[in-house]
């Protein structure tokens, strides 16, 4: 006969609590956690500069005396002028960076990459969507404190509502370009402009990237947008920053590498007065690029197109290589061997994450060793500080020296004439791009 005793009652209560937690409370807590944005900081956003930044900015560089204008002139007391800020990257150099899903909210991927390649990246790129509707200086300060330049892929959409239907991925009417042009996001944009103005150091803003495709709401091929609206929206956002005095922003205009059916790049370019760096996204291993293509084969045709309308410095804002065929290490080695041939490419940012495939360098010993060997070259030793001034121009490649004349050869009537060899035009490769939405995963 079953007897009710205190121990048995306690055991039944414990069992009931366990069952309730497992099947009722735990699922609710899990759903509540899933509803929270994992790409945000907890608590109120601070407005004051952190102490490390205040100290860094207070440590003024040593002033150098002004040079007399004329040699032998009588020296007179003159005010001292501080040295100009260091250029980033330094002349003749190039920076390296990574893009991660978690950005400043979890620096684990950054630390793993740094340990694997024995080199700290100079730039950390990460995404922030407009749906968040707030500015938090911690997304910048957390990165800058490491001596790394923050680059934000500033995305006017809500990645959480991205359609699973490929053709509808860019359909979010709330974020149509017309709404940006008409000022419906002005209050939010101004908040960011004032926030960035108050940071005290330069940052890069990669606004509305890969606009020549179809997969984002700001693309002219999607969301009911019309031709010419992308440039209007870009200039509108840029002008609001300028009006706010947020001048330490490097504006990164960043299309995808050209592919079949892409929008023409020259129709999307806002103009040199509105752009500081040209960024490009391109991968070996996306749909349409399964066969091996080198760094040059992926990027050079698009760079050639870009050079028809601007000479701005180029940054590879997203790249990566698959290891499906075991060629990731080879691709990386080849990338570093080809980069010095492009003095106008001032930076390369690796997509250090898993998406369609595992793009991570740190996930492969061979890839990490290849990257470590390439990045050890002196040209990549170009540190960023809170005082750095981003490069605005790049020197053109030096012309090849003319061959020495043969003294034994008789002069000809056309000896003084010069001829240009025909330039072989590279054939653009059709690539169906990878969506680079960072948090969407």
Image (tube, helix red, strand yellow):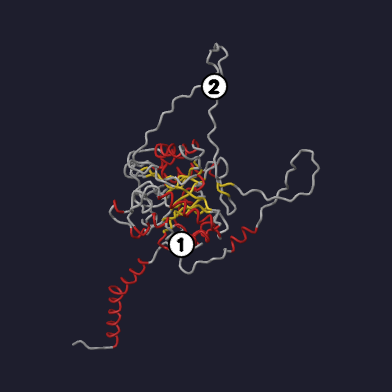
Q: Is residue 68 left or right of residue 398?
A: right
Residue 249 x %, y %: 53, 53
Marks 1 and 2, Cα distance to the nearest angstrom? 59 Å
Q: How many marks?
A: 2
Residue 229 x %, y %: 40, 50
Q: In the image, is residue 187 above or below residue 269?
A: below
Residue 237 x %, y %: 47, 55
Label 2 CA crowd tier, 10 Å (few <14, some 14–19, many 20+): few
| Res. 407 image quadrant | top right
Label 1 CA crowd tier, 10 Å (few <14, some 14–19, many 20+): some
Kindly identify the residue that appears in the image at 62 percent across and 58 percent down.
Answer: 57
Q: Which mark, by number, is residue 235? A: none
Kindly identify the residue that appears in the image at 49 percent across and 22 percent down.
Answer: 419
Q: Nearer the viewer, mark 1 or mark 2?
A: 1
Q: Residue furthest right?
A: 74
Q: Which residue is mark 1?
A: 188
Q: Nearer the viewer, residue 209 or 326?
A: 209
Q: In the image, is residue 423 above or below residue 95?
A: above
Q: Is residue 395 left or right of residue 101?
A: right
Earlier residue among tags 1 and 2? 1
Q: Nearer the viewer, residue 223 or 354?
A: 223
Q: Which residue is mark 2?
A: 403
Q: Residue furthest front?
A: 182
Residue 278 x %, y %: 47, 45
- Asked if the residues shown at circle 1 and circle 2 are in contact, with their CB atoms under 8 angstroms apart, the answer is no
Q: Nearer the viewer, residue 277 or 438?
A: 277
Considering the image in quadrants, where does the C terminus appear? bottom left
Tell me the element at label 1: helix
Considering the image in quadrants, where does the N terminus appear? bottom left
Q: In the image, is residue 15 above or below residue 285?
A: below
């Amino acid at each position: 006969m079953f007897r009710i005793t205190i121990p048995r009652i306690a055991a039944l209560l414990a069992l009931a609590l366990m069952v309730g937690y497992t099947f009722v409370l735990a699922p609710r807590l899990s759903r509540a956690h899933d509803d929270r944005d994992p790409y945000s900081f907890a608590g109120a956003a601070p407005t004051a500069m952190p102490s490390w930044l205040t100290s860094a900015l207070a440590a003024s560089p040593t002033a150098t005396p002004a040079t007399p204008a004329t040699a032998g002139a009588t020296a007179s007391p003159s005010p001292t002028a501080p040295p100009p800020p260091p250029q980033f990257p330094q002349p003749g150099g190039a920076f390296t960076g990574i893009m991660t899903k978690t950005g400043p909210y979890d620096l684990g991927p950054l630390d793993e990459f740094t340990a694997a390649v024995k080199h700290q990246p100079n730039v950390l790129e990460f995404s922030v969507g407009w749906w968040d509707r707030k500015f938090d200086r911690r997304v910048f300060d957390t990165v800058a404190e490491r001596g790394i330049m923050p680059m934000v892929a500033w995305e006017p959409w809500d990645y959480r509502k991205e359609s699973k239907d490929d053709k509808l991925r860019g359909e979010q009417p709330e974020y149509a370009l017309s709404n940006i042009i008409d000022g419906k996001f002005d209050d939010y944009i101004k908040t960011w402009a004032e926030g960035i103005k108050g940071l005290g150091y330069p940052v890069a803003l990669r606004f509305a990237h890969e606009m020549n495709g179809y997969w984002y709401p700001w693309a002219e091929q999607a969301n009911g947008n019309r031709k010419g609206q992308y440039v209007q929206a870009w200039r509108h956002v840029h002008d609001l920053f300028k009006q706010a005095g947020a001048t330490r922003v490097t504006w990164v205009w960043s299309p995808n590498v050209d592919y079949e059916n892409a929008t023409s790049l020259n129709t999307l370019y806002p103009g040199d007065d509105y752009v500081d760096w040209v960024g490009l996204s391109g991968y070996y291993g996306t749909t349409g690029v399964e066969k091996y293509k080198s760094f040059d084969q992926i990027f050079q045709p698009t760079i050639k197109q870009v050079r028809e309308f601007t000479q701005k410095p180029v940054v590879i804002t997203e790249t990566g290589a698959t290891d499906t065929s075991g060629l990731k290490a080879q691709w990386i080695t080849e990338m570093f061997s080809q980069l010095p041939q492009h003095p106008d490419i001032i930076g390369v940012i690796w997509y250090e994450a898993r998406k369609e495939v595992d793009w991570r360098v740190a996930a492969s010993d061979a890839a990490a060793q290849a990257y470590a060997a390439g990045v050890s070259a002196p040209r990549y030793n170009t540190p960023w500080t809170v005082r750095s001034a981003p490069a605005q121009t790049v020197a053109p490649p030096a012309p090849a020296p003319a061959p020495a004349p043969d003294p034994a050869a008789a002069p000809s009537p056309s000896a003084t004439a010069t001829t240009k060899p025909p330039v072989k035009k590279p054939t653009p490769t059709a690539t169906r791009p990878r969506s680079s939405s960072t948090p969407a995963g």
